[in-house]
Image (tube, rainbow, N blue to C red):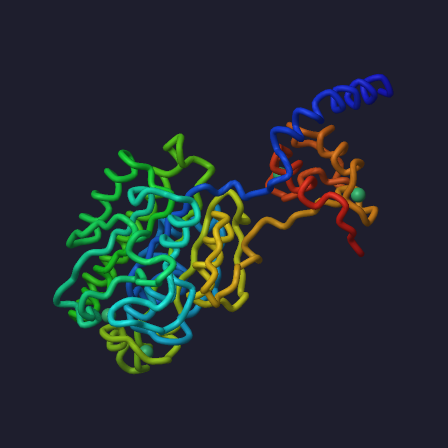
């Protein structure tokens, strides 16, 4: 027993230098790529507000692997232009002509990483007869420090299915790092007043999200390094009590139906099977993506949704300080899943002890805690 313990400690000492070099003191998340899907104008009562999940069987299953916020809102302006810009810039309602005043996530990401255009992708169909269509609006800026030179590569197709087919090819050929897939059919069918087609287009969007996640997780470049976020720009009006299907045709005010939207997120840095009622809004998405990908969304006014992230316990032995003892404990249990719960070496509580846990301890080395 003692012998095996000392053996393990000497093994640890041999490995420690190597580990420190590999992990380094720079800490980052496991996420290297982010996919954001915006399903235009799907009302909460037809998505996660329906406890049978009839229209969204795939997204329901994905929510068990990730996070669901049940109090997520567009609390400001429930029109597509305003909302899509708020999602992609982290900032509300300041425009110059058709462009938001402040940069989009692609602009931040491309400039700060010196990324070529094809690694940031935006699939946004042109829908000329959509009542929300406002000229040539695009959710990208002309900001003097960002702007045109950092815009994403554009897709330009006519239906959700077309957009998805095109994105599949883009994924295979280019493996972009930051992707937004905008699915507009839902809103379009609802404005036409066709309940069947409206709910059908939510089902198609749901299938696309399911296929997208399968594709991500079966691609060696993306697998376990990619975060997926799915949301809506706005919902639709509440139904009136005696007319159960009348509200869905329009949107644009501050009723609960218009303001409440879905928020689903999954990826290597997020909790699994986690539901939260922390009230968050559309402008919190861009800062959260920036946090995951380690770029600065310096003009965004939203906040990082920290509740989604794994909780971290770098002070493994709970003695009030993160030091070499904590590092030794984590290293001793590296690669094991059976460990004493009173010194839980699975620092981020994801069920595995690996370099990621060591990285967190190193990041917080010397930090003091009060319990
Ligand atoms: Ca400690
Ligand atoms: Ca872990
Ligand atoms: Zn609309
Ligand atoms: Zn409304």
Q: Residue, x 18% and y 48% (percent of image)?
A: 162
Q: Where in the figure is residue 121, as x and y percent of width and height?
A: 30, 48
Give residue 331's position: percent from left, percent from top: 71, 30
Nearest the camera: 216 or 204? 216
Split into 4 quadrants, where in the image is the C terminus?
bottom right
Indicate which quadrant contains ligand 3: bottom left
Q: Position of residue 145 (x, y in %)?
A: 38, 59
User: How many labels, in total?
Assistant: 0
Q: Nearer the viewer, residue 195 or 20?
A: 20
Q: Quadrant of residue 9?
A: top right
| Residue sitting at x 42%, y 74% | 75
Residue that appears at 18% across and 72% down:
131
Residue 265 visible somewhere in the drawing = yes
Query: Where residue 64 sits in the image (x, y, percent)?
Result: 48, 49
In the displayed structure image, the side of residue 319 where residue 291 appears, left or right? left
The quarter holding residue 244 reads: bottom left
């Amino acid at each position: 027993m003692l012998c095996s313990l000392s053996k393990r400690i000497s093994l640890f000492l041999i490995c420690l230098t190597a580990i420190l070099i590999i992990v380094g003191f720079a800490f980052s998340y496991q996420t290297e790529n982010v996919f954001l899907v915006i399903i235009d104008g799907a009302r909460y009562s037809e998505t996660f507000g329906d406890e049978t999940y009839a229209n969204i069987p795939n997204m329901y299953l994905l929510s068990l692997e990730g996070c669901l916020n049940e109090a997520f809102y567009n609390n400001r302006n429930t029109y597509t232009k305003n909302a899509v810009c708020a999602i992609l810039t982290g900032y509300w309602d300041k425009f110059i002509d058709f462009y938001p005043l402040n940069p989009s996530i692609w602009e931040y990401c491309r400039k700060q990483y010196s990324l070529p255009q094809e690694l940031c992708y935006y699939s946004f169909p042109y829908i000329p007869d959509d009542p929300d269509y406002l000229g040539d609006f695009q959710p990208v800026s002309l900001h003097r420090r960002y702007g045109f030179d950092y815009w994403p590569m554009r897709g330009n197709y006519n239906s959700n299915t077309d957009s998805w087919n095109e994105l599949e090819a883009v994924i295979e050929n280019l493996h972009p790092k930051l992707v937004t897939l905008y699915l507009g059919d839902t809103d379009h069918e609802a404005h036409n007043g066709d309940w069947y087609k409206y709910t059908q287009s939510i089902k198609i969007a749901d299938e696309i999200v399911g296929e997208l996640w399968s594709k991500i997780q079966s691609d060696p470049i993306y697998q376990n390094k990619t975060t997926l976020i799915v949301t809506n720009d706005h919902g639709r009006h509440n139904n009136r009590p005696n007319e159960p299907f009348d509200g869905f045709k329009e949107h644009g005010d501050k009723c609960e139906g218009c303001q409440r939207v879905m928020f689903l997120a999954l990826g290597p840095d997020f909790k699994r099977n986690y539901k939260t009622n922390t009230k968050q809004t559309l402008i919190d998405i861009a800062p959260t993506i920036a946090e995951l990908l380690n770029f600065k969304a310096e003009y965004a006014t939203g906040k990082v949704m920290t509740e989604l992230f794994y909780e971290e316990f770098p002070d493994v032995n709970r003695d009030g300080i993160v030091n070499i003892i904590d590092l030794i404990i984590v290293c001793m249990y590296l690669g094991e899943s059976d460990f004493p719960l009173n010194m839980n070496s699975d620092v981020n509580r994801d069920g595995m002890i690996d370099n990621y846990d060591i990285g967190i301890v190193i990041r917080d080395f010397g930090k003091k805690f009060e319990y």
